[in-house]
Amino acid sequence: MSVPVRQTDGMLAETDDIGTPFQRSLGLRWGVVDKEAGSVSVDMNIRDDLRGPAGSVEGGVVSTLADVAGASAIGFQVCLVATEHLAISFLAPGRVGPVRATATPLRIGKHDGVAEVRVIDTGKDDRLMAVATVTVRVLDKS
């Protein structure tokens, strides 16, 4: 993932060159949480087509959000990365939204990086929905 950083009022601009077409189809919005720590957030509104039979956000959508946030937190610093491993624990359903995944790099090395991600339902008193670790391979440092 190669994601240009264009900050406007704490959120990164939602433009055609941020993220993949799939990520844009989800309506993802990137933001800077803590520039010094390298933390970023990725927000997404909950739409009916992203809900499962019980009315909450599908687990695959939550996993995608965690993956994108973790890869972005590292990718913003090194350029191009590819996810190698994602471990996620689902803690509560997301029903209200928007949903926010906040990722903080734990380690960025020459060939790989690891980020910690927390996913919350901001419309439900910031209920913690999931926690994840994302390991990425650094593809390009240019």
Image (cartoon, rainbow, N blue to C red):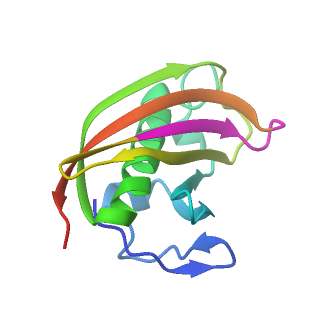
In this rendering, is residue 55 above or below 28?
above
- Please tell me which residue is depicted at 46% across the width and 36% down the height of the picture: 61
Residue 27 percent across, percent down from the top left? 51, 59
- Residue 118 is covered by the magenta coloring: yes
Residue 36 percent across, percent down from the top left? 57, 64
On-image quarter of the N terminus:
bottom left
- Please tell me which residue is depicted at 74% across the width and 38% down the height of the picture: 96
In this rendering, is residue 100 above or below 91?
below
Residue 23 percent across, percent down from the top left? 39, 56
- Considering every residue shown, the one lying at the far right of the view is 125
On-image quarter of the C terminus:
bottom left
User: Could you say which is closer to the camera, residue 21 or residue 38?
Assistant: 38
- In this rendering, position of residue 6 left or right of residue 125: left
| Predominant SS of the magenta segment | strand
In this rendering, is residue 20 above or below 99?
below
User: Could you say which is closer to the camera, residue 10 or residue 62?
Assistant: 10
- Please tell me which residue is depicted at 52% across the width and 47% down the height of the picture: 104
- Please tell me which residue is depicted at 51% across the width and 19% down the height of the picture: 89
Count of all numbered marks drawn on residues in the image: 0
In this rendering, is residue 38 above or below 59?
below
- Residue 56 is covered by the magenta coloring: no
Q: Is residue 49 visible?
A: yes
User: Could you say which is closer to the camera, residue 95 or residue 132?
Assistant: 132
Residue 18 percent across, percent down from the top left? 39, 70
Q: Is residue 19 visible?
A: no
User: Could you say which is closer to the camera, residue 41 or residue 35?
Assistant: 35
Q: Quadrant of residue 85?
A: top left
- In this rendering, position of residue 32 left or right of residue 5: right
For the record, the magenta segment spans 115-125
